[in-house]
Each structure stands twice: as structure tokens, then as C-alpha cells.
């Protein structure tokens, strides 16, 4: 798996908005429906921080293998070079058909 600087070109998301961008920092808001996902990827020098606004999101991580479930108001940070996948809860198991909306704050690691 290779790292990517800007994965937005391969994201299958309902909506994507960028709220703030400056060197070394960016806030993006993503909305995905139950059939969509953010595929496996990692960032070479970026820490991804997920903050859930509405719905729920499931994060699957490698190195080490881990699964996180986040609800509105919850956050989770993924260190640089750690592979991760983001899906709404209905993508992997039966769940209410709701959209998930969250923000990620990406910061360049040292």
C-alpha cells in the first residue's frame, strides 16, 4: 500500500467540503451514504483526526488491527503511515439506513 498526499480523487462520497486549509493543516467534511466508504489508505506524513457530526462511523485500522465505532461528538486520531478504512455502520453490518457525516482534521506529522 502506498501513501497519498490527497486522496479526494478516489473518494466515493456523497459530499465533500473543505472548511480550512493552510500549510500543514486541513479540515474536510465528508458525508457518505450506507453504500459508500473511504477505501484503505494511509498518509505518509499526516495524522488524520475524525470528528463525527451526525450518524456513526466505523474505522478499521491495521498495524495493529483495530476497529473503532464513533458517534456524534466523538473523535479518533490515526497516526501517519497507519492504514485505515472508514465506513458507515450499515456498510459492514445491518444498521439503520442513515447518512454519516464527519470532519477530519489532517495535520502534518514531524
Image: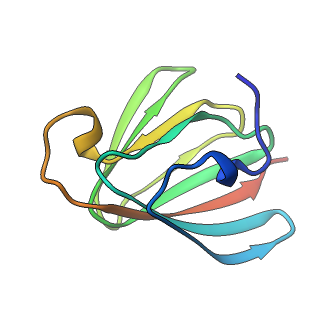
Viewport quadrant of the N terminus: top right
**Number of on-image labels:** 0
Say if 32 sits above or below 36 in the image: below
Say if 33 sits above or below 26 in the image: above
Out of 10 and 89, give the one closest to the viewer: 10
Is 18 displayed left or right of 99 in the figure?
A: right
Is 92 displayed left or right of 101 in the figure?
A: left
Residue 29 image position (x, y, % from top left) = 53, 68
Is 82 displayed left or right of 75 in the figure?
A: right
Out of 66 and 41, give the one closest to the viewer: 41
Rendered residue at 68%/58% (across/down) = 106
Rendered residue at 74%/48% (across/down) = 46
Say if 39 sits above or below 31 in the image: above
Say if 7 sits above or below 51 in the image: above
- The part of the image, by quadrant, that contains residue 35 is top left
Q: How is the image coloured?
A: rainbow
Residue 9 image position (x, y, % from top left) = 68, 51
Out of 35 and 43, give the one closest to the viewer: 35
Rendered residue at 80%/47% (across/down) = 5
Rendered residue at 85%/47% (across/down) = 110
Residue 45 image position (x, y, % from top left) = 80, 43
Is 101 displayed left or right of 77 in the figure?
A: left
Out of 9 and 5, give the one closest to the viewer: 9
Residue 24 image position (x, y, % from top left) = 83, 62
Amino acid at each position: 500500500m502506498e501513501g497519498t498526499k490527497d486522496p479526494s480523487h478516489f473518494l466515493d462520497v456523497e459530499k465533500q467540503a473543505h472548511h480550512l486549509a493552510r500549510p500543514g493543516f486541513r479540515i474536510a467534511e465528508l458525508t457518505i451514504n450506507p453504500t459508500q466508504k473511504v477505501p484503505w489508505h494511509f498518509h505518509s506524513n499526516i495524522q488524520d483526526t475524525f470528528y463525527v457530526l451526525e450518524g456513526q462511523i466505523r474505522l478499521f485500522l491495521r498495524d495493529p488491527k483495530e476497529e473503532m465505532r464513533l458517534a456524534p461528538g466523538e473523535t479518533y486520531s490515526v497516526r501517519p503511515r497507519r492504514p485505515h478504512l472508514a465506513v458507515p455502520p450499515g456498510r459492514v453490518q445491518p444498521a439503520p439506513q442513515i447518512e454519516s457525516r464527519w470532519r477530519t482534521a489532517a495535520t502534518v506529522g514531524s
